[in-house]
Image (cartoon, rainbow, N blue to C red):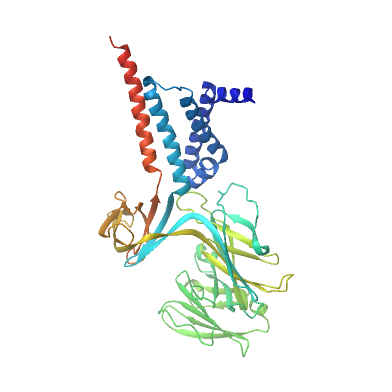
Amino acid sequence: MKTALRIFWRISISLKLAVVVILGLTFSLIAATVMESMYDTPTAQYWIYQSWYFYAILGTLGWLIFAVAMSRLPWQKKHLPFLCAHLGILLTLYGSWLTFQFGVDGSIQVGEGQTESAVELNEPLLIIAAGATTDASKTTTIPIPWIPPNAEFKPIALPYGLTVAEFISRAESKVTFVEAKDAIDLAAPALKIKVAGGPSAPPFMKLGQEAWLWGGEATWNRQQVGPAILSISSGPDYLPVIGKGPEARFRLDTKKSRLQVTIQTSDGKSTEQSFPFQSPKDLVGLVINTGWKFEAQITVLEWIPRAKSDVSFTAARIQYGAGASSSAIRLNTGSSNVWLGLGDRATLDLPPGPDGVARHYTIGYFPRRIVLPFGLKLNKFSIDRYQGTMNPSEFSSVVDVSGGKDPAVTDRLISMNEPLKHGGFTFYQTSYIDAQPRPTISIFSVNQDPGRWMKYLGCLLIVLGTIWLFGMKYLKRSP
């Protein structure tokens, strides 16, 4: 045993181990820098900075520094510069660990005139609220580790027989409509149409444009296809006319089994057409002449009298960088699949299990949030643009901060080069959400670094120890 410990100690203070550790750290940092420039920071964090081997390298470096310092016992005055530099390295490593364990790195969005205190972190969570007919509701929170697009995902088993079967790092939604079979489903008429020009139309007009109309939500019951407005009503009346331009309005006459269509031309004239059907398939392929320019026609591609939305997700076209979208997951309930994008929630009613108890679930997929001990109020958002363009040259926010232990702040400017520090948190102006006629929502990155002072002190000691060491050598050589 003593021999093994002696060998271990000899290896710990050997120059060869130091060279291996330094080379490993150097190559890891080079790889992380290249990966971050080619892809983005989260990808570099996953593959390098938060990997087990990078932690092993840093841990070995810390032990190596400590062992070498202890090997100089009993310390003498000449060892002070050496100990100063080594202590600086250990403090820097420990400060980095504190930041990783207890630091905050997220974002907060504040609308003009509003106060916000909830910070969203880059840590997705699955929140399951399960209620049964015989017991009280309870909530389970499960972290869903983010992985980059090129990493392998392993399904995650969840309570209540649920499974995260698929994870898409950067996802975009794909909405279609299917027949609603349950009475509890939000059902409304859905129509998939194509608008295309006739024989005299330019080539690009002949290609046409497809769109779904669905009466279940305001975001789907009216769509703009080219210069025309198309709408569908879930009730007995048409939706109101928008203007005097080309417009097509659809409604379902359930009593007479007819699809009613009102066509308005660009000069404001309207005509109504009626199309009877016995089954929805009878209307597929129906061509409606509109009287619009270029002999435009509307073709019915799909018709569902009672439809519900069916949302799925696919990999987004942009997978890396600041413009990449957020993640999405596919939940398997055993009998069906449910897609959730980050920020979405769903309600599931499952049949009774072995215990004979029917289950009701509310499931949400959200970023983890923390609540600040104070509120941030956005008084005014300002933006300057490059002359002759809509591209922003600079933007800033004027905010008030109230609550917490620190004194309140009034009318404080936060710009891209001027952050705000308050209550141990630092706020940086990073982006905005453009709401015409001008931006009204400001986005700040929020950072709390409990290890910052220790890292600064460590760097100072490293520099001081290095200068001290070279200064002593210089004095020894001087006559």
Q: Nearer the viewer, residue 106 or 178?
A: 106
Where does residue 302 sit, x and y in percent of width and height? 62, 73
| Residue 385 visible to an observer of this rendering | no
- 343 w.r.t. 315: above or below: below
Q: Determine whether, in the image, residue 377 is placed left or right of residue 259.
A: left
Left or right, residue 173 beside residue 132? left
Residue that protrudes farthest toward the top in the picture: 479
Of residues 268 and 78, the one drawn nearer to the viewer in this rendering: 78
Quadrant including the C terminus: top left
Decide: is 399 above or below 3.
Answer: below
Most distant residue in the bottom direction? 255
Question: Most extreme residue toward the right, as rendered?
Answer: 354
Asked if 78 appears above or below 132 in the picture, the reply is: above
> Residue 434 is drawn in which quadrant?
bottom left
Camera-side residue of 211 and 160: 160
Which residue lies most toward the left here?
411
Q: Is residue 138 visible?
A: yes
